[in-house]
Image (cartoon, rainbow, N blue to C red):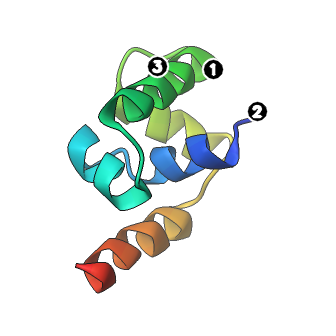
Amino acid sequence: MKISKRERDVLCLMCLSNKQIAEHLNISIVTVKSHIVNLLNKFGTNNRSQVIICALKQNVIDLQDIVIELSLIHISE
């Protein structure tokens, strides 16, 4: 599965709200939503949880990627 760097960033933060993702990545909420729709389509899923599960199963990301990305939010706030 090929995803862009920014889609990967959004994917690792999908447990957060769109607003939180946008603020952390310095992108608009519309852009966040666009990335999420792209990810839903690429993984053929209907919701964010399914995208994360599929990405983990397909080794697109691993839990450490998510933990690292989330830890950066807490450091910067």
Mark carried by residue 1: 2
Q: Earlier in the sequence, mark 1 or mark 3?
A: 3
What secondary structure is found at the residue carrying circle 2? Answer: loop
- Disc 1 designates what residue? 42
Quadrant assignment, res 67: bottom left
Q: Position of residue 3 (x, y in %)?
A: 70, 37
28 with respect to 77 (left or right): right
Quadrant assignment, res 29: top left
Mark 2 and mark 1: Cα distance apart in space? 8 Å
Q: Position of residue 64 (x, y in %)?
A: 53, 70
Q: Residues within 10 Å of mark 3 (few under 14, many from 20)?
A: some
Residue at 44% across / 31% down in the picture? Answer: 31
Residue at 45% across / 68% down in the picture? Answer: 69
Mark 1 and mark 3: Cα distance apart in space? 9 Å
Residue type beneath disc 1 = Lys
The answer to whether the residues at label 2 and label 1 have Cβ atoms under 8 Å apart is: yes
Mark 3 and mark 2: Cα distance apart in space? 15 Å
Residue at 46% across / 19% down in the picture? Answer: 37
Confirm whether residue 17 shows in the render: no
Confirm whether residue 25 shows in the render: yes
Residue type beneath disc 3 = Val
Q: Earlier in the sequence, mark 3 or mark 2?
A: 2
- Disc 3 designates what residue? 37
